[in-house]
Image: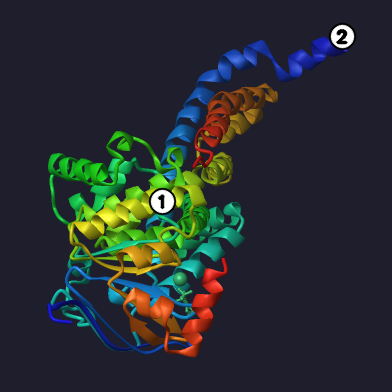
Amino acid sequence: MSSKPIVEARGIHKHFGAVHVLKGVDLRVAERELVFIIGPSGSGKSTLLRCLNRLEAPSSGSVVVDGIDMLDPKTDINHARQRIGMVFQSFNLYPHMTALGNVTLALRKVAGKSRTEAEAIGRAALDRVGLADRAEHTPGQLSGGQQQRVAIARAIALEPRVMLFDEPTSALDPELVGSVLEVMRSLRESGMTMVVVSHEMGFARAAADRVVFMDHGQIVEQGAPAEIFEAPKEERTRAFIGQIQRH
Amino acid sequence: MTNWERFLDTFFNGKVLARYWPDIAYGALITIELALLVVVTGIGAGLALALLRSVGIRPVNWAIVFVVDLFRALPPLVIIVLIYFGLPSIDVSPSGFVSTWLALAFVLMAFSEEIFWAGITAVAKGQWEAARSTGLTFGQTLINVVLPQAIRLTIPPLTNRTIAITKGTALGSVVAVTEILGQASSAVSNSYNPSPLMLGAAAYIIMFLPVVVLGRWVETRFAWKR
Ligand SMILES: Nc1ncnc2c1ncn2[C@@H]1O[C@H](COP(=O)(O)OP(=O)(O)O)[C@@H](O)[C@H]1O
Ligand SMILES: [Mg+2]
């Protein structure tokens, strides 16, 4: 990896009480790179993502994002989080606000934009996800795919340096998955650095620079998509890929 | 006199009604004043406690839960009497009006804290995570994202509880507050006729029926839509 890393996580351990969920994970993500994380349910993929923006505090290890030490108590975490967009499986849109309200809230409260500025930025972000005409709709009036695209707009409006996606299409009806992947692909083409946890192998093949396979809180194997999908070295990876491809 | 005439003469005696309605009207004013004070301070304090509780400082939360449970367990009349007759022993002598106000406000505070707290905890965890991940602070998330959703869940039970507790203003008659029931009772003893009680009942209906109807409307209006 030649270019400088945007995300550099080292030796991440995470315990939930007696449960050891992450057992020394190292993850380096270079600028403009798309890293795709796969692994069985419960292997710690979500926990790893959540450690990157400190939604979850690692028990030990270090996380540096865009040069900011995320675990330093002196770091202004709310300021740092603006640089790390996150998209959740369950969208988590604010149901009492319009699409535009969802997108502009942090612009106004965190980035300190005026309402007019925030709305201009917000509308541009909604336009990027193809929902300019849905700005005044509330989440309840949108399909799942549209809701997830609003959630992506909410994150990219803050101009993050990296975007984290935690199973962004897993809650969607199959016919709505494509529209969300399309937005992710265009985001990728715009040069966004991305870490994506997902089971969308087709997307991984087409868009990922690197695939990381996790199991039991550890990175078992990583490499180019073709390597991991076609010629995995580890037995556990092979078993998992086989299982996924049967679906 | 037929039975019917005797009934009217006893409960709807024209002379007595004419003589005492201004007293009852004055009582209604006191009741309204008391009720508004109770509602504003009780709900305000309940909301403040619920917000404080959501910060999650253990000893503070234990204290809140203790106070809330205490005021939910005690009958309001007992609290009124404790304040009115008990506080003078430490050289504070609140009037009957103030005693009733404080007692009912504490009770409403306790119940509304529980209702607000239930509303806050009912908001999905993902809402917090989404908001915090965009850099909003705990307080900004609470105020802009969680509370508006919590309050929608809160309005129906809060309306019902508020109506129930404000009706307790009638308990003020025990400590000589000249609210509706107090005025009606003294009118009854002065006139040797129960008609003023009918006036009192009418005053309560005029005051509370619209509130109950409003509560019903609010309940359907704010039913959770997604
Ligand atoms: N907040 C939590 N408290 C306790 N255990 C948790 C918590 N979050 C996750 N876990 C546990 O950590 C393990 C990994 O979870 P997760 O990171 O969600 O896995 P994945 O996303 O790969 O399915 C699971 O066993 C899960 O039960
Ligand atoms: Mg997960």
Secondary structure at badge 2 equals loop
Secondary structure at badge 1 equals helix
Question: In this figure, what is the number of numbered marks?
Answer: 2
| Tag 1: amino acid | Gly
Residue placed at 61% from the left, 56% from the top?
A: B75
Marks 1, 2 in one chain: no
Report the residue marked by disc 2.
Answer: B2
Task: For ligand 2, tell me if the residue under mark 1 lies within 8 Å.
Answer: no
Instruction: Give coordinates of residue B83: x percent, y percent.
Output: 49, 57
| Tag 2: amino acid | Thr
Tell me if I can see residue A44 in this picture: yes
Report the residue marked by disc 1.
Answer: A178
Report in which chain the residue with disc 2 lies: B
Query: Left or right of A132: which side holds B70?
Result: right
Q: Nearer the viewer, mark 1 or mark 2?
A: 1
Residue B203: image quadrant is: top right
Tell me if I can see residue B50 in this picture: no
Residue placed at 48% from the left, 87% from the top?
A: A17
Report in which chain the residue with disc 1 lies: A
